[in-house]
Amino acid sequence: MYKVYPDKRYNITLNFLKEVQPAPRQVLDLGISNPFSEIMTKEGYQVENTKGEDLDEDFTNVENSQADLITAFEIFEHLLAPYNVLKAMNAKYLIASVPLKLWFAQAYRSKSDIRDRHYHEFEDWQFDWLLEKTGWKIQKREKFTNPVNKIGFRPILRYFTPRYYLVYATKE
């Protein structure tokens, strides 16, 4: 039985992770330590995070990691060139999620934090193509919605329109 977390994304992502790569696993989680990397640790995964370096410029931690599983939850949309990081990975397994491009909403852009912007919001086929082009073979996919507690036309659409795309891929 899985613990229930208040964030729907955490529940779906954790269930997906446990299904395709059950603990214990040594994991390199792209991005600084965050609530989900703490959840993975509590669930028995040995998690190391990247240190906040600009992964467009410096992916030596990714190249030098001894982890055979890399996780990247809502990271690739922040990179100008996710191709380079994906190509440099030496791990055999990847679990990644990205926000999907929504026809009724513009790409996310923080006005106060230049690092917190989406350079890419993918369609599922685009992310698949990026993974395949960098040597990854997709084994499992899942899309899910992320409703918000607001009133309006767009919040209603979020109940029915998938917002996130979660992928498990392998590399020989």
Image (cartoon, rainbow, N blue to C red):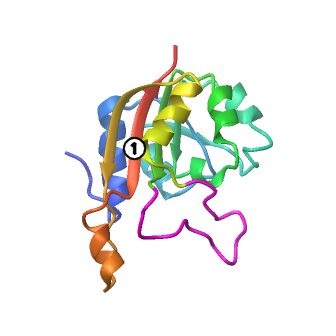
* Residue 167 position by quadrant: top left
Extreme-left residue of the structure: 1
The location of residue 83, given as percent across then percent down, is: 65, 35
Residue at (76% x, 49% y) in the render: 54
Inspect the image, locate mark 1, and give the three-letter code of the amino acid beneath it: Leu
**How many numbered dots are placed on residues in this image?**
1
Hey, which residue is sitting farthest top in the picture?
172
Q: Is residue 5 left or right of residue 87?
A: left
The residue positioned 64% from the left and 56% from the top of the image is: 119
Q: Secondary structure at mark 1?
A: strand
Q: Is residue 170 visible?
A: yes
Magenta residues: mostly which secondary structure? loop
- Any magenta on residue 159? no
Residue 153 x, y percent position in the rendering? 31, 80
Q: Is residue 142 left or right of residue 123?
A: left
In the image, residue 61 above or below residue 11? above
Above-or-below relation of 27 to 143: above
Residue farthest along the right direction in this orientation: 57
Mark 1 lies on residue: 166
Q: Position of residue 133 (x, y in %)?
A: 57, 26
Q: Which residues are magenta?
A: 101-120
Q: Nearer the viewer, residue 79 or 65?
A: 79
Is residue 42 among the parts visible in the rendering?
Answer: no
For residue 16, which quarter of the picture? top left
The residue that appears at 33% across and 57% down in the rendered structure is 162
The residue located at (49%, 40%) in the rendering is 127
Q: Viewed as shown, does residue 162 lie left or right of 28?
A: left
